Image: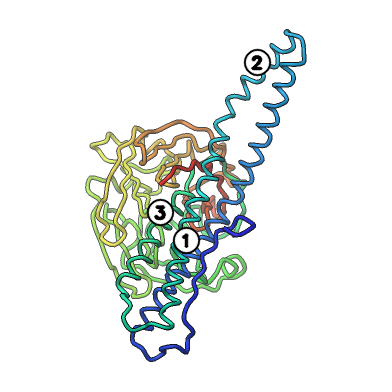
Amino acid sequence: QDTEGRCVCTVVAPQQSVCSRDARTKQLRQLLEKVQNMSQSIEVLDQRTQRDLQYVEKMEVQLRGLESKFKQVEEGHESNIARQYKAIKAKMEELRPLIPVLEAYKADARLVAQFKEEAANVSALLSALQEQLGGFDYQELHSRVSSLEERLRACMQKLACGKLTGISEPVTIKTSGSRFGSWMTDPLAPPGDNRVWYMDGYHNNRFVREYQSMYDFMTSDNFTSHRLPHPWSGTGQVVYNGSIYFNKFQSHTIIKFDFSSSLISRSRQLDFAGYNNMYHYSWGGHSDIDLMVDEGGLWAVYATNQNAGNIVISQLNPNTLQIIRSWTTNHPKRSAGEAFMICGTLYVTNGYSGGTKVYYAFSTNSSTYEYIDIPLTNKYSHLSMLDYNPRDRALYAWNNGHQVLYNVTLFHIIHEL
């Protein structure tokens, strides 16, 4: 960490002129790129957590200050006043669990220090290659960088995730299309790739619009059109790592279509999943199978006869489309307005029109559910798509012919690795 508390990862590399003709220079460059990517990842991690850390620190000061004042009142006033303040203090005790949360944040500084130390060791090894390129074990260096990279990824996922506690007012990006549809960006797009993907309607359409940026999407109708090999069903499509995943119309088949090659790279049936308006969301629209992406990867949300029409959550392998693991819930699919995944938890709305809120949450991490109450401003009175993007930490929604965004607030509870 630097003096401002930011996470820093530094690598000292050989000069470009050194061993420029050595075949191993390419391997060295690849290792350097990996460590540089880790540095960028730490910067993203810092941006995501600073706001929450400031909030918790402020809360800690307030709690400790109140606790001190209550103690003074107890010691310096008559017994009847002291009893009143003891009652208030008892209420304040309910807020004390916030203090360990801050302590956990501080404890994570030790993890960052470990990452920094290991990155420094890698830097020293790379620097030594300037003088001794002959007998160095590249495989060992690669193994150490890979290990550090995996630990950093696990730490990032832990710090980035949290429990949904709030949803902002909607921001209307554009007004276009029919009453139903979906739009999205790719959470795994490389830096500089800010394309927006747009799909109007919920059936009998197979054309996906590609806009080069959010600005182009907002201000113009300049787009590239991609024709899918089959029409889609519902509005539960996702773009993930350069491919679009969608439910083939009137089937329980999931298709992975690669935009770069314009070919189907994988297709697989989602066994027992209802389709063709058998187990749709309450708004209808062939929304039987909803594909989602969060920090943990690709998910499918659907219902089966075997689970009495209640929601089933399946984590999918994005390459093979095979089910990694499934969870059965007790929530009827037809009673859900819309749903989205954040950090392995499925959040369900109570409806799609009028007053709307997120009221049910099922955690795949603990296989438990709870009823919650998080208001969701339904500005245009008809939600037909609601999906979370982990890169933007935002909800993308299609609301009665309006494309809107919601920011979300996550409460982080940190556990040691």
Q: Earlier in the sequence, mark 1 or mark 2?
A: 2
Q: Which of marks 3 and 2 is nearer the N terminus?
A: 2
Q: Is residue 11 visible?
A: yes
Q: Point out residue 44 in the picture as x, y percentages from the top left corner.
A: 53, 60
Q: Point out residue 89 in the picture as x, y percentages from the top left corner.
A: 65, 20
Q: Point out residue 35 in the picture as x, y percentages from the top left corner.
A: 45, 69
Q: In this view, does 304 lie to the left or right of 71?
A: left
Q: Which of 384 and 413 is in front in this view?
A: 413
Residue corresponding to mark 3: 154
Above or below residue 69? Residue 266 is below
Label 3 CA crowd tier, 10 Å (few <14, some 14–19, many 20+): few
The amino acid type found where label 2 is placed reads Ala
Residue corresponding to mark 1: 117
Residue corresponding to mark 2: 87
Above or below residue 178? Residue 206 is below
Q: Nearer the viewer, residue 391 or 24?
A: 24
Q: Which of 60 and 323 is in front in this view?
A: 60
Q: Which of marks 3 and 1 is in front?
A: 1
In which image quadrant can residue 205 be found? bottom left
Q: Which residue is drawn at 44% across and 74% down?
A: 32
Q: Earlier in the sequence, mark 3 or mark 1?
A: 1
Q: Point out residue 262 in the picture as x, y percentages from the top left corner.
A: 34, 73
Q: What element carries label 3?
A: helix
Q: Nearer the viewer, residue 357 or 27?
A: 27
